[in-house]
Image: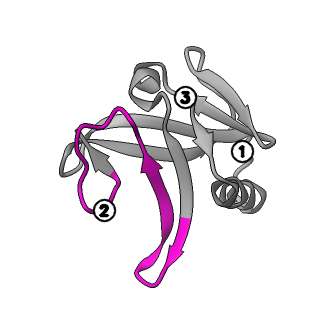
Amino acid sequence: MIKLTESAENAVKNAISTAAQPASGLRIMVERGGCAGFKYTMRLAPAPKPDDTVIEKGGIKLFIDYNSHEQLAGTTIDFVVELEGSGFTFDNPNAKSSCSCGKSFS
């Protein structure tokens, strides 16, 4: 199960409400790449794909890619605002290591 902090929920709700294209949820995936081997990708989506797992959190639909579900299990997603910039962070108990930016893991 994926968890969203209140800050992440607010950021996603804001993104959905201001999106140029209609979106009904947030698609979350893990892909090969990044400096540690895998990277998180997120984007607004109009609907889930047929093999996605759909999770509702705080009135937000999360579309979890079938191939990413196991790697994301137990992950907490937060949205932080810092001097260096704002963005989503991932606390993933399945990651053996991660890069300094927190967007890539192995």
Q: Which residue is mark 1?
A: 23
The vertical placement of 50 against 40, above or below, is above
Check the image and tell me how it is coloured. one colour
- Residue 25 or 74: which is nearer the viewer? 74
Q: Earlier in the sequence, mark 3 or mark 2?
A: 3
* Distance from Cα at disc 3 to Cα at disc 1: 15 Å
The vertical placement of 51 against 77, above or below, is above
* Distance from Cα at disc 1 to Cα at disc 2: 27 Å
Residue 94: x percent and y percent?
35, 32
The vertical placement of 10 against 69, above or below, is below
Query: SS at mark 2?
Result: loop
**Other residues around mark 2 within 10 Å, as few (<14) / some (14–19) / many (≥20):** few
Residue type at numbered disc 3: Ile
**Other residues around mark 3 within 10 Å, as few (<14) / some (14–19) / many (≥20):** many
Query: SS at mark 3?
Result: strand
The residue that appears at 55% across and 28% down in the rendered structure is 64
Query: SS at mark 1?
Result: loop
Left or right: 68, with 106 as reference point: right
Residue type at numbered disc 2: Cys
| C-beta proximity under 8 Å, tags 3 and 2 | no
Residue 102: x percent and y percent?
34, 56
| C-beta proximity under 8 Å, tags 3 and 1 | no
Q: Which residue is mark 2?
A: 101
Question: What is the span of residues highlighted in magenta in the rendered image?
Answer: 80-103
The residue that appears at 69% across and 40% down in the rendered structure is 25
Residue 55: x percent and y percent?
68, 28
Q: Is residue 5 located in the magenta-colored stretch of the structure?
A: no
Q: Which residue is mark 3?
A: 64
Which quadrant is home to the N terminus? top right
* Distance from Cα at disc 3 to Cα at disc 2: 22 Å
The residue that appears at 74% across and 55% down in the rendered structure is 13
